[in-house]
Amino acid sequence: MRAAVIREGSLVVEERPEPTPGTGEVRVRVHATAVNRADLLQIRGGYPAPKDAVQDVPGLEYAGVVDALGDKVLGLAIGDRVFGLVGGGAYAESLVVHAETVARLPTNLSFEEAAALPEAYLTAYDAMVSQMGLAAGETVLVHAVGSGVGTAALQIARAIGATAIGTARTEDKLDDARALGLGTGILVKDARFSAAVLEATGGRGVDVVLDLVGGAYVNESLACMAPKGRLVLVGLLAGASGEIDFGAVLRKRLTIKGTVLRSRPLEEKILAGRVLERHLAPLFAEKRLTPVIHASFPLAQVEAAIAIVAKNEGFGKVVITCAS
């Protein structure tokens, strides 16, 4: 099989032996994967893969076909169309995964469409709904609304009856987000947006903040949160440190929580696979949630795919096609 292997801070497509599934595992012929910022960090040496994952091949999500079964695998068969998350190794034509983490692919989705879904939609759903309890009638502030997770969060909020306010650093991304149904879009300059959020909410503030940026955005978000508001920190694009107004946290009884998916133990990854299949896949099948793809590249052009994400040029996901 071919795989994009990390070599001295870049990716080289090489031939590798096809992996063999062990007990409780399946092998997936990977038709497509997608680029995530964690991949960029791993390639640069700043974010090692979990110990149980492929160490030198990035890739956190996949869509493909089961083509081999390990012992004691129930509920899956060779030929099943599947998708899901993995700790690494998806930039390859074949991948071995634990069978219980796999979700069946809705029939109306292509492999390229499906590859753009697991990381973004699971991250957004897990953070906003499972952990922060976002509910119908509430308002969520989504930072970096033009990103893969941002576009997923916008759609999930609408699907459950919540209202989304989105921020971005360019008007083009806000316009694209409005085409997906974003009602209020805020152009951010110098990490300032709280006044605009308060104006949009009639002074009340937002119930939940999905923060993919970090840095100065955290404190600015505290200033525009409603009483008992909940902030979940998912990314650190603007930095891993910043000032915090603890007075606002106390006065408004705010919750601040951090989250990651990649390093969770297997039992939690199995639960994430069930969320993907039971809660999100039906919404994809009904087209209440739709993939947002900026561009697609073949595996041989993986460096071009990585470059788009590194420059923050895309709206939605950048997909890589692997096996045919």
Image (tube, rainbow, N blue to C red):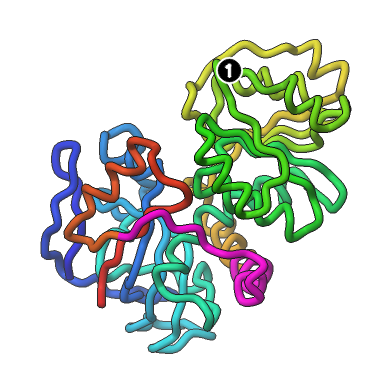
Q: Residues within 10 Å of mark 1 (few under 14, many from 20)?
A: some
> Can residue 179 be seen from the camera position used here?
yes
Q: Nearer the viewer, residue 266 or 87?
A: 87
Q: Quadrant of the C terminus?
A: bottom left
> Which residue lies at the image location 11% right of the left edge and 59% below the top edge?
14
Q: Residue furthest left?
A: 15
Q: How many marks?
A: 1
Q: Quadrant of residue 272?
A: bottom right
198 to the left or right of 66 = right
Q: Where is residue 236 shown, x and y percent of the image? A: 50, 29
Q: Quadrant of residue 284?
A: bottom right
Going by the numbered disc 1, the residue's amino acid type is: Ala
Q: Which residue is mark 1?
A: 216
Question: Which of these two is toward me, 94 or 151?
Answer: 151
| Residue occupying the point 32% across, 68% down | 95
Q: In the shown orientation, is residue 93 left or right of residue 102?
A: left
Q: Where does the magenta region start and end?
A: 276-296
- Is 279 contained in the magenta span? yes
Q: Nearer the viewer, residue 72 or 140?
A: 140
Examine the rendered structure and indicate whether residue 298 appears above or below residue 235: below
Residue 75, given in percent of the width and then of the height, sits at 53, 85
Q: Position of residue 94 (x, y in %)?
A: 28, 70
Q: At 42% across and 59% down in the image, what residue appears?
A: 61
